[in-house]
Amino acid sequence: MASLMPRLALRGREPRWLAPVLVMIAIAAVFALTAGPIRAAGANPPAAYQRYLLTPLTGTESLTEVLLAATPILFTGLAVALAFRAGYFNIGAEGQFLAGAVAASVAGLYLSDLPGPAAVPLALVLGCLGGVVWGLVPALLRVRFGIDEVVTTLLLNPVAFLLVQGLLNGPWSNPTSGFPVSDNYGAGYTLPMAIPGSRVHLGLVIAVVLAAVTWLVMSRTATGLRVRAVGLSPSAAAFSGVAVRRLQFRAALLSGAVAGLGGAVQVLGVGQQLTTQVSGGYGYTGIVVATLGALTAIGVVLVALLLGVITVGAQNASLVLQLPPQMGQIISSALLLAVVSALVLRQYKLVRPRAGGAP
Amino acid sequence: MTDLAYLALITAMVTAATPLVLGALGELLCERAGVLNLGIEGTMYAGAFVGFLVAGNAGSPWTGLAAAVGIGVLAGLLVAFLTVTFGVNQHVAGIGTTLLLIASCDFANRLLYGAGTVPQVPKFPLLFPDVPVAGQYLLTYITFLLVVPAVFLTLRSTGFGLQLRAVGENPEAADAAGISVARTRYAALVIGGVLMAVGGAFLSLAILGSFTLNITNGRGWVCVALVIFARWRVVPAVLGGLLFAFVEALQLQLVITPAFAAVPREVMIALPYLVVILALALSGRNLRYPGAYLQPYRHT
């Protein structure tokens, strides 16, 4: 079987046009693969792609909705990119995001009288702390005992969801609503709007500033160089005097803080209450965003905007074409797999098996 | 607790352990071949959904199970294509596969059943329903009496098992000895995918007789943890599955115990996950991972 399949051989050097062409091929492959399900749902694929990719860009209101949809995944994308860069595979941004939302809700529900200038910063700081707390145990287990952070961070995601659910069914339940939602926070806990007349809140500005700072630190400082060195080769970094474990520990906690801040921003920016739907997979989407963004701050911003477009497009297609909104997630995850596979061909080329088999 | 309650607890434990043992053995085969398969959560989910869907349409859980086997093969091939042929980062390939499979199932579910409730489908009957402990589904018997020994013996004493371990420990040496690393890893991932998908189908076709969103609820991640906990050995993986299932069954039992009525249900449900993390923390030090863990291999 394997000997009949084309295999990959190292390329001499990479032509400059190659990467964009490969990405285009990957996008075309995703279109081709999703055409079947879209047709099965009774929609016309070209019309659906137009909804997904172009319609969100054609109006001021939908453009602001794109920015709103991109905000939470900017945070989780940055969080994941930070950790991955340092060689710490934090797959727990989902749980850390939820923990941040819960921590911000503590302030919003129990200190509801605070005025805005005190309330918002308090809730945001608590959000960061919530994310740090949720990321702390896996980080400690990793640097102290070498226990794989992938599985511990993953396992804490369902636990965080159960925490939200337990709070909403228990102490924070709202008897006047039939749904698992908390009471509204105090009036001070509303993030100011960033674009008047839209739903885009200050969270977007915070995320963009965070991305800019990340870019600056990663590309212009010695700390950034150390982080990148650890991610590329921990042993080489250790050999040249970098305290690898301490750096990974800090990256892990910082990653948790950014994801938790994202959760706090989301509850303060949209709805001002905790619901079980508050994340809905933003932490996992953050992995898509970070990876497609090549773990760079600029890449994360661009991909978060792209996925924001697709999310708004998917909501639109769901209303107009009755296409289930999950198509948005299908497209983004298929895009992830197609692009990372295609980019392998930057270094390798496909060769046909030679007649006569081996080698 | 009465004797009867203890027996009920053990019965529930064995049932709840079945999908975990299947998933963990599937993951174990992949990892022993050198590939971390984080597609497991999505593969179990897809097995549960496709099994449910086909069982409902065909009117038989067996047809549903066959369909789950099919989707397991496909999921295994996808992960193999990504990680073996292309050598993509295994964390990214696995998470991407899980996201894609779950989104696809939820898309189809929404398309076919709308936002409303899904139907009940024909489910597997209990064998010996009146006998404590032995009152289990046929799939549970198959899992413990056939699959576990088969995986154990295959890994330990067959040529294929040796090849599988060789490509996971030292692919260069395996290659030099004439073993096709790619073909062996493809085989491990496909067999692993089938076991995971059947584990998922057990949830929909045996336990529930239906499908709910989020049906696997992180069980795939638990299986990944169990494999590490078991240090990539079959028997400890089975015991780990039973341990997790015991806490799960205990939790179900405690929920209906008056003394624990004040403890929120969610705390109980979270308990098994926390126990697994604790077990890892206590036992997971100084591990020796398979030699070629996470390493793609290119025949030169």
Image: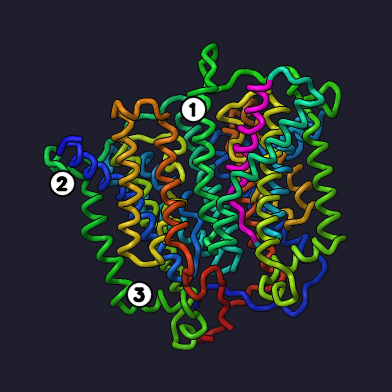
> What residue sits right under mark 1 in the picture?
B114
Horizontal side of residue B233 vs A268, given as left or right: left
Q: Are marks 3 and 1 on the same chain?
A: yes
Query: Which quadrant of the rendered structure holds the C terminus of chain B?
Result: bottom right
Residue range highlighted in magenta: A88-111
- Give the amino acid at mark 2: Ala
Which is more toward the observer, B38 or A334?
B38
Q: Is residue B215 magenta?
A: no
Q: Residues within 10 Å of mark 2 (few under 14, many from 20)?
A: some
> Given contact means CB atoms under 8 Å apart, are the residues at marks 2 and 3 in contact?
no
Where is residue A102? Give x, y as percent. Answer: 61, 32
Where is residue B60? Give x, y as percent. Answer: 27, 41
Color style of the picture: rainbow
Report the Cα–Cα distance between label 1 and label 2.
Answer: 39 Å
- Give the amino acid at mark 1: Gly
Which is more toward the observer, A151 or B251?
B251
**Residue pictured at 65% horizontal, 64% vertical:** A245
- Where is residue B205, by image quadrant? top left
> Given contact means CB atoms under 8 Å apart, are the residues at marks 3 and 1 in contact?
no
Q: Nearer the viewer, mark 3 or mark 1?
A: 3
Which is more toward the observer, B80 or A240?
A240
> What residue sits right under mark 3 in the picture?
B161
The residue positioned farthest toward the top in the image shown: A176
